Image (cartoon, grey):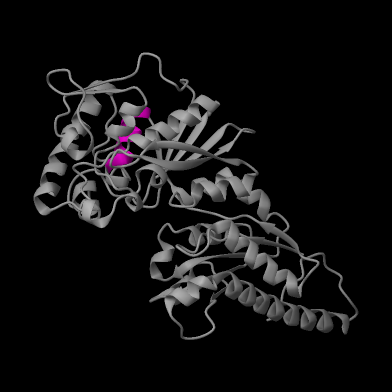
Amino acid sequence: MKVVFAPNAFKESLDAPEVARAMAKGWKRVLSDTEAVEAPVADGGDGTARAFAAAVGGRLETRAVRGPLGPKVRARFAWNPKDRTAVIEMVQASGLRHVPPAKRNPMKTTTAGSGELVAAALRLGARRVVIGLGGSATVEGGAGFAAALGFQMLDQRGRPIGPGGKGLERLARIVPPEKPLWRSDTEFLAATDVDNPLLGPRGAAAVFGPQKGATPEQVKRLEAALANYAAILERDLGRKVARLAGAGAAGGFGAGLAGLLGARIVLGIETFLDLINFDEKLKGAGLVFTGEGRLDRQTAYGKAPMGVAKRAGKAGVPVVALAGSLGEGYETLLKKGFAALFSIVPGPMELEEAMKSASLYLERQSAAVAQTFALGLIAFVSRFSSRGGFRGRGRLRPHS
């Protein structure tokens, strides 16, 4: 029997490859002859690069690049030389995790380091660049990213604008590089799990600004700067981004990628599953495992486990999900393609303890599901054997 293990990361506890490994280990403890296919997944956020490298046999590249406040940080991206695909998480170079709470101010933070990572990937020969949006410390529309790739971001006097939202307020003209690092057929994808537009009450400044430390007054300034940015992108580069779904992601970085590079804004999990040829991995499978740290009503809206469940459902393969916790409304997922949902935590405990032992608990719960499956399979075989054996060619499934 073939089982596909396709979980997302358990945030701040285990990355997706570690989760898949623990699930497979627990299952094979009970059903050792299983063909276990580990296919860790991600939706564009933290851990996407490592999950991609693990799933396709690629490698992780590390570079020292500018952090959101300027000083260098070490950041990595995934590189698959077989098909020249690079997967970059902006959180690696431009993430909120690099900025202490007391210093969070989107008027100052920049995406320049993310541009340096993309430049490194292009120098390796990337022909497809996937940029995961999420966890950013910025609300400057990717202006710093643009400068790092050779765009001239100029004020009214023809001088380079400064970093952050404060610099974006001064933007008057964009001049593309004369000799870009990318070819005309290079594909850029901006992967996100939100559809927020650039401007307005659901826009980058209003929704994401306060999360990154913006005051109410700064939110107003950032909104005006982003509106001006959209107008300049349309005038100088011919691309309309103001009303584009997902343009507001990561402080307007979605708009910048679309306007500067012609990137397509795509749903993170769907793109990731395509990148790792997930549909091929499903062929011949009898069961799929997925999961992440928490499953609740929101899981159905663009989250990685839901994407896995949809693909598996189309292939006619049942899906079991494991989670650190089952939150409010998780039962609705049983009507949206999940066959069963389980919390891995054995009982009441402190969060720190649960996270520390997550790998052990994943193994135990996966083994328990395998044992239940095995008992159902035994009943199924027994029932049909007593009737003269099998005559069909369908896959063995647990007896219900």
Left or right: residue 207 versus residue 1 is left
**Residue 317 seen in render:** no
- Residue 58: image location, x then y, percent: 62, 41
- Residue 119: image location, x then y, percent: 44, 28
> Foreground residue, 36 or 67?
67
- Residue 377: image location, x then y, percent: 76, 78
Residue pushed farthest left?
217
Q: Is residue 399 above or below residue 4?
A: below
Number of numbered discs overlaid on the protein picture: 0
Residue at x 64%, y 72% (from the top left corner): 363
The quadrant of the image that shows the N terminus is bottom right
Q: Is residue 211 above or below residue 371?
A: above
The quadrant of the image that shows the C terminus is bottom right
Q: Quadrant of residue 239?
A: top left
The segment highlighted magenta reads: 252-261
**Residue 204 seen in render:** yes
Residue pushed farthest front?
71
- Residue 154: image location, x then y, percent: 20, 22
Left or right: residue 390 versus residue 380 is right
